[in-house]
Amino acid sequence: MVRKKITPIKEELQRTKEDLADLEMYIEDFSSFLPLAVCTLNPLEIIIDINQAFQDLTSYSLTEIIGESLERIFLEKKEAKSLLNKTREKRMVRTEELTLISKEEKKIPVRVFVSVRIDEKGNFIGYFLTLADITEVKKFQEKTEEKVKRRTKELEGSRMALMNMLEDVEESRKALTNVLEDVDEARKRAEEERDKTKAIITNFADGLVVLEKGNRISLINAEGERLLNVKTKEIENKTLSDLSNPPAIKKIAELIRKTKDEGLFRKELSFKKPAERVLEITSISLASREEAVIILHDITREKLIEKMKTEFVSLAAHQLRTPLSAIKWTLKMLLEGDLGKITDEQQDFIQKTYNSNERMISLINDLLDVTRIEEGRYLYKPALTQLENIVQFVVNSLKEEIKRKRIKFEFKKPKEKLPKVKVDVEKIRLVINNLLDNAIRYTPTGGKVTISLKHGKEKVEFSIKDTGVGVPEDQKNRVFAKFFRGANVMRMATEGTGLGLFIAKNIIEAHGGKIWFESTEEKGTTFYFTLPVKKEFAEFLKEF
Amino acid sequence: MAQKMRKILLIEDEEIMINLLQKKLVREGYEVSVARDGEEGLKTMEEVRPDLVLLDIIMPRLGGFEVMEEMQKNKELRKTPVIVISNSGQPVELDRAQKLGAKDWLVKTEFDPQEVIDKVKKQIG
């Protein structure tokens, strides 16, 4: 019975043993087949078993690794330890990523799954641990990351480029804004300037006419309207030549046309209509030369006053001459004994008085010459003459004076005969007389005076050089002014009216010539004048 | 000799000039008549029939030029030589005087009394 009983148990056991062996084999096979690396740990965290995949992954053989602690195969030892602790609490932990160190010291990224091992009675008997090689995943991940990075970088680059572009645009915008502001400012300034100019033009004391292209009148101010007797409405945008009325405009138009290129400077024009008026006209070409401003300065009153002054001086001088003549003649007769015998002392006094009177007469004569110049009735009879003859005449008349001052005088005549000049002989004689008289007067005794004549291009040049006192540097620009006398000359207390050179300049210029000088104080002075040989003179004469 | 005395008519308004010239001319042996303006001058001319006239230009009533114009109208008087004695020596005036038959011209301020005599002598001896 027992046997009977034992036998089935034995059989049962045998079968169970066989089943177990089968199961173990099965598990072993399964375990070795499993692609996932698995290792079994005891509660002390010692490796007690690994499968084939684990060996493949770590390159450790079973014998090499059994009995080793888990930490040994991981780079992150602490993490490995804490991972197991965590597992004991939670029974199962997954997706921890650690770095496995293979036998060849290769670092392999792995994902770790750990679960606790429990026996049938629920006792903790260790851990199961599986490692999934995530190298490929990592690689892929890294690749992806790199891609993302690269892409990000590219995008960043693009973004930067875009930013730069935006900055540029912003800068351009700012610049443009600035430009616009500047333009606006400039426009404002221009407008202000225009308003200012307009205000000046409108309120200008002189008449102003602004001409634009084609001599079209673009602006005329109030004074201009008054002087020309026109209304802006009537003449604006018309050309000067369109307007034949009033006659004043016609006259000005003619003048402007004639002198288009040079412009005009203080040219006097007289008008009878609308009122008797003298205008001083200046025209200025503006930058473009197409435009011009004409300034009309009303000098009617000045002219009147000037005329009155001239007339007064002329009259006074004439009136003075009568008594001066009487004095002259009386003294002369006294001196010549016509009125009875006189003592030597009386003779002496009378002679001195006579000399003073002569000076007075010459002053009056000079004044009359000046007034005649100012009245514009001065040149009279132009005649073709040899300048040389006039010079000789003057030299002869001053011979005595030259001798008295023991001046070495020389008259350098040109080798060839000079062409004739058309001059008012009397007046040119006066010029040369004034110049020679000055040279003698202001050259110390024993000095030298030289007159030369030269033939220039279409002109004859006269020069007179002395070794006299010279003209002070700071007074040179006033030499030809009316009543000018050099400071050094005044000290010499010699006689002289200060009118001689003024008269000379006017006479020479009226002949279309030029007069000028060079001088060094204490060394001497040279005066020059030229007279045109040809036609020009005729023109000038008309004006006089 | 007395009949042969040359007669000069001095037409001049300035008293002192009259005195001076008269004195000088008389001393030189001329018979001198005096008129103090142009009108009087022409009248005296008719009466005296002078051999020469010394004529001022600017005078009251009738000026020197007008006197010469009147003389030109008269056949007899036209022949009488005239020397102008003037205050001014403007070429314009000189020309005009010459056209009106003046033989010579003197600017008072520029001539001495003696030169007047010289010019007179040159005309009528």
Image (cartoon, rainbow, N blue to C red):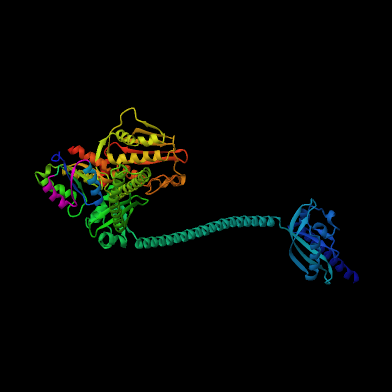
**In this view, A389 is above or below A65:** above
Q: Position of residue A241 (x, y in %)?
A: 24, 53
Q: Position of residue A331 (x, y in %)?
A: 31, 46
> Taking B28 as reference, is A477 left or right?
right
The number of discs equals 0
Residue A305 or residue A142, whichever sits in front: A305
Q: Residue furthest top?
A: A415
Identified at 34% across, 29% down, the residue is A414
Q: Verify whether residue B6 appears in magenta.
A: no
Q: Position of residue A197 (x, y in %)?
A: 38, 60
Residue range in magenta is B28-49
Q: Residue furthest left?
A: B75
Q: Verify whether residue B40 appears in magenta.
A: yes
Q: Position of residue A253 (x, y in %)?
A: 26, 52
Quarter holding the N terminus of chain A is bottom right
Picture quadrant of residue A71? bottom right
Residue A101 or residue B29, whichever sits in front: B29
Residue A280 or residue B83, whichever sits in front: B83
Q: Residue furthest right?
A: A2
- Tell me if residue A424 can be seen: no
Residue A74 or residue A316, whichever sits in front: A316
- Tell me if residue A492 can be seen: yes
**In this view, A141 is above or below A377:** below
Picture quadrant of residue A462? top left
**In this view, A458 is above or below A307:** above
